Amino acid sequence: MAPTLHLDKIREVTQVSVGKAKQLMETCVWCLLSCKHSNGLSMRVVEGNDHSYLVTWRDDEIDEDAIVRSYNKDDATEAGAEAIAFLVSIDRTPFTAVERAITTTGIDYWLGYKENPNNPFERAGRLEVSGILVENPTNKVSTRVTKKLKQTEPTDHTFPVHIIVVEFSEPYATMVLKP
Amino acid sequence: MTTVNDLHPQAMDLADSAFSYRRKGDDEQAKRFFLEALELERQAAELLPATEDSEPSRSILYRSAASLAYNGDAFDEAERLIAYGLIGFPPPEIKEELKDLYENINFKRHLHQQGIVLSKNSLTMTLYGNATSYGGTSVEPLILRVEKITALFYRTVERLLGLQYRISGNTKKEIKDTYGLYVNAFAPASFAVAFQIGAPEIQPLLFADYEQERNRVEPDEVIEEVMKCLEIIESAKPDRLKERIPDLTYYQNFVGIAKEIAPDGDEIKLVGFNTLRSGEDWPVALRKRRDQIKDTFAVVEATPAAQVSHTILTGILTFANSPPGKTHGSVKLIDADTMLHRIRVPIALMKDIVQPYYEERVIVTCHSKNNTLFLDDIVRAT
């Protein structure tokens, strides 16, 4: 039986607020519904080999019509990819928490551990997420991964970088670790 | 006892709301939430002593708190928080990010304190880097960017008017008369230059002869479009730029010009723009370098990578041809061995990017496909 990514349990791994967790779930569901998928779909995660996951959500927490009206492609693809990336990275790495910090332009995400409440970024890695609603020849997951690898190429590289690019139409996600 | 994990997640939730308000255009609410988040994030950072054991959390929290202060326009507080972050033992990456943030604050502070008062339909461009000093800057990087902003501006006007991409010739006189771009003056005691858009008295009937009358745009819309596109360049979101500029030629042209304007490393580290939106400052700091823009915004062709090889050539640009109706023009380059190379160039890059280098020594990055060279990038050889 393939492991399951529970979109309704994002809060348990990320420490985000109830509202933010709901938004992440809804945007991800928006992306999946837009691509004609339904609850319980199968998603391939490529990390060296292929790994199969089921993606589920609680139907009683989702108002499909309201979701379709509430989001647009831009915001939903980005946040929806974050939802998948958080769940996949917690499942596929030793990390136990997704941490957030602020930059001048937005929020950056880190993978960390829950055990030290006063040093949440101890032994942490950066998490770089990108989403594509429907892959096409000029907008490919492999190209996004390559670009992310290039973008995270500082000379003094202290933290490992985990790159996850999510594609919603097939759907699949590629996960790359830059040590 | 209160821990970082008691305060920090609350701060992040407030910050998340602040960014959400900002996206909706409610800057006042956004600022309020940024400052509330700042208070909690600062308290979280202060829980950690400036020892190596506290890292990397301490410096990440201070960077985060300083970013919140920056977003809330609390520049003095942001500077203090950066200093506290640097006092500890930040990892090199975080140290670099704290320094970058300090430069961003300088840019914003400069706008606030140097008396650069923006009038309607105007924008300023400010350069930072080793080529600049207080009250002055080397001529070359400034003039180059003034020329490129001018090209970027008129291309944006033409695109918003719904005109077909202009392969050759100058911008039409009617457009220049209506959307005249004026360099007001080099702002006193600064290295900022101010552009004023629109002739002093705009004549509304100038567009009577245009079929594109229905597409007429106001000067402030042009500025907004330029600023939004530059913002997208900085945020490295090629899909958003493609949605904003669906015409591939205009897209390639915008990216090509943005690369020329972008910081080049140490000489110019940051190119800042500012304009007024709803009476409030709207700064955009461009710190992505041209090579980063090239990698992020490249138009990827559907050709297997194995069939493409890459070449770098140095030589004199001797010939340029932009045939109407074609997707590519061509240039010739004579290298040090007097060998002549013919290079095909996307038509979007011919007039504004490549032709200005005519008869100059340049370094050209190309890819080769079916024995034909295609231009990827061009820079002046030093």
Image (cartoon, coloured by chain):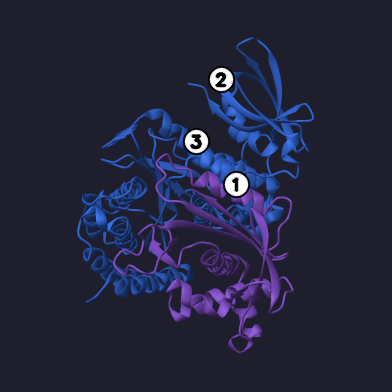
Chain colours: A purple, B blue
Q: Secondary structure at mark 1?
A: helix
Q: Secondary structure at mark 3?
A: helix
**Front tag of 2 and 1:** 1
Query: Disc 2: which chain?
Result: B
Q: Which residue is mark 2?
A: B360
Side of B4 relative to B155 (left or right): left
Foreground residue among B109 and B6: B6
Query: Disc 1: which chain?
Result: A
> What is the CA distance from the residue labelled 3 to the residue labelled 2?
17 Å
The answer to which quarter of the image holds residue B269 is top left
Percent position of residue B8, x then y? 33, 70
Foreground residue among A83 and B51: B51
Q: Secondary structure at mark 2?
A: loop
Q: Amino acid at mark 2?
A: Glu
> What is the CA distance from the residue labelled 2 to the residue labelled 1?
33 Å
Percent position of residue B295, x then y? 57, 42
Foreground residue among A161 and B351: A161
Residue furthest out toward the front: A1
Taking the spot 66% from the left edge, 50% from the top edge, the residue there is A142
Percent position of residue B272, x then y? 40, 47
B341 vs B201: above or below: above
- Label placed on residue A146: 1
Side of B200 relative to B217 (left or right): left
Disc nearer the start of the sequence (3/2): 3
- Label placed on residue A110: none
- Label placed on residue B147: 3
